[in-house]
Image (cartoon, helix red, strand yellow):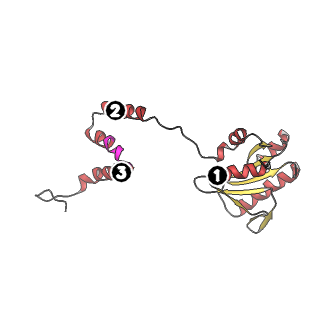
Amino acid sequence: MTETTPIERVAELLRKADFRRIPIPLSIGGLQIDAAAAFVGEPPCPDLVVVGDTLDQTPARLQQTVEGVGRALDMMGSRRPLTLVVVGPRPESSTLTRLSRHARVLPVGDASDQSNLENWLAVLLPLELPKLQESRADAAFDKLLQATKDPIERELIELSHAGEAAVSSRLAALVDEPFVETDDSGAQQ
């Protein structure tokens, strides 16, 4: 098995989370900003993720990079959140504090342990919800129906098995019902 760099391990995890790698040097509003790597997320996670490597960049250079990206985003009027992922030896806490004034900072270290890397990058990754056990879901559904006295509420709960569209459609019809005129035969006008 080939050994990958910490930057490539971060890149692979972000790629799986639908982040797109963007070319370096990073170009924002005509400014060219050098970084180890950069990624942009797709909604609902529109973060700009810049990767810094403490083996190749001094703390001052990391700060210069983050400040440059932050200022460029401000100049462009961007509302995109900025995240700095720091790979390599962990910088001193004073350096991390200075960096965190401009971006969310995630110091992942050498990122050799996949589980540890996933924990550090969890704020950028989609949640993985546990599978719902069918028997528990049915029991909860039955309990909800038993506790419901309102006929409209009961109808909407029963429609929930048919899906979101069925519930939305019926709810819209119920809201419109008092405002829809009918003729003597009961047909809508």
Q: Which residue is mark 2?
A: 142
Which numbered dot is residue 89? Answer: none
Nearer to the camera, 83 or 18: 18
Q: Position of residue 21 (x, y in %)?
A: 70, 59
Give the distance between the C-alpha atoms of the residues marked 1 and 2, in whole angstroms.
38 Å
Residue 123 image point, x, y percent: 65, 44
- Of 170 and 163, which appears nearest the observer? 163
**Looking at numbered disc 3 in the image, what kind of residue is underneath it?**
Ser
Residue annotated with mark 3? 168
Residue 93 as seen in the image, left or right of residue 183: right
Identify the amino acid type marked 1: Lys
Q: Is residue 92 above or below residue 30?
A: above
Asked whether 122 or 73 is in front, the reply is 122
Looking at the image, residue 64 sits to the left or right of residue 144; the answer is: right
Q: Earlier in the sequence, mark 1 or mark 3?
A: 1
Horizontal side, residue 162 vs residue 61: left or right: left
Query: Please, what secondary structure does the residue beneath circle 2 have?
Result: helix
> Where residue 16 is drawn, which disc sits there?
1
**What residue do we see at 83% from left, 51% from top?**
63
Q: How far, Cα to Cα, is label 2 from label 3?
A: 21 Å
Q: Residues within 10 Å of mark 2 (few under 14, many from 20)?
A: few
Q: Kindly check if marks 1 and 3 are in contact, taking CB atoms under 8 A apart as contact.
A: no
- Counting from the top left corner in percent of width and height, residue 34 is at 82, 60
The part of the chain drawn in magenta is 157-163
Query: Residue 141's spot in the image, x, y percent?
Result: 36, 35
Answer left or right for 98 relative to 187: right
